[in-house]
Amino acid sequence: MVQHITYHHRLSYNMASNKTRLSQTPGNRIIYLYIKKVGKVPKSACGVCLDRFRGVRVVWPKVLMRLSKTKKHISRAYSGFMCAKCVQDRIKCAFLTEEQKIVVKSVEGTSTESEGQINEALA
């Protein structure tokens, strides 16, 4: 026979504040477990691509007070300003521009040396 399940709280309507899921107890009974509402994602966004930050917990402000600092903040460079993808792109861009400067210097150095050798040969 199917077990009859009843709410524990007084609220008997299927509302957003009364969401439940079924759970089986060690005594082999099936009961309702009340589900808490999900919080909202922090509104702060990336300054470059306007995406939301990942890595910050999505909880209610009351729960946020009890969380440790590492779970409320992102610990990396440009953590409150840029998302991880934009930081990666910025690092790659900086690396490639530095490499380009080195290549330009080496090309200029070899061209001045070859011009000097040609002038000596002509003289």
Image: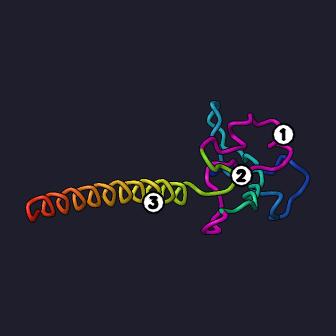
Which residue carries the number 2 mark?
58
Q: How many badges with numbers are in the image?
A: 3
**Label 1 vs 2, first from the N-terminus:** 2
| Residue shown at the point (62%, 30%) measured from the top left | 26
Residue 94 at x, y = what percent?
47, 56
Dominant secondary structure, magenta: loop
Give the alpha-carbon distance from disc 3 to disc 1, as whole Å.
38 Å
Is residue 67 covered in magenta?
Answer: yes
Measured in 3D between alpha carbons, the distance from the residue under mark 2 to the one under mark 3, in whole angstroms, is 32 Å
**Residue 61 percent across, percent down from the top left:** 84, 48
Using the image, determine if residue 110 lies above or below residue 32: below
Residue at the image position 76 percent from the left and 55 percent from the top: 39
As drawn, the residue found furthest toward the front would be 123
Q: Where is residue 112, by image quadrant?
A: bottom left
Q: Nearer the viewer, residue 61 or 84?
A: 84
Residue sitting nearer the eye, 96 or 89: 96
Label 2 Cα crowd, 10 Å radius (few <14 / some 14-19 / many 20+): some
Numbered badge on residue 65: 1
Q: Say which of marks 2 and 3 sits in front.
A: 3
What residue does disc 3 label? 93
Q: Describe the element under mark 1 as helix, strand or loop.
A: helix
Question: Which residue corresponds to the image point at 62% horizontal and 36% vertical from the top-left?
Answer: 28
Magenta-colored span: 47-76
Q: Which amino acid, mark 1?
A: Met
Q: Position of residue 84 (x, y in %)?
A: 55, 54
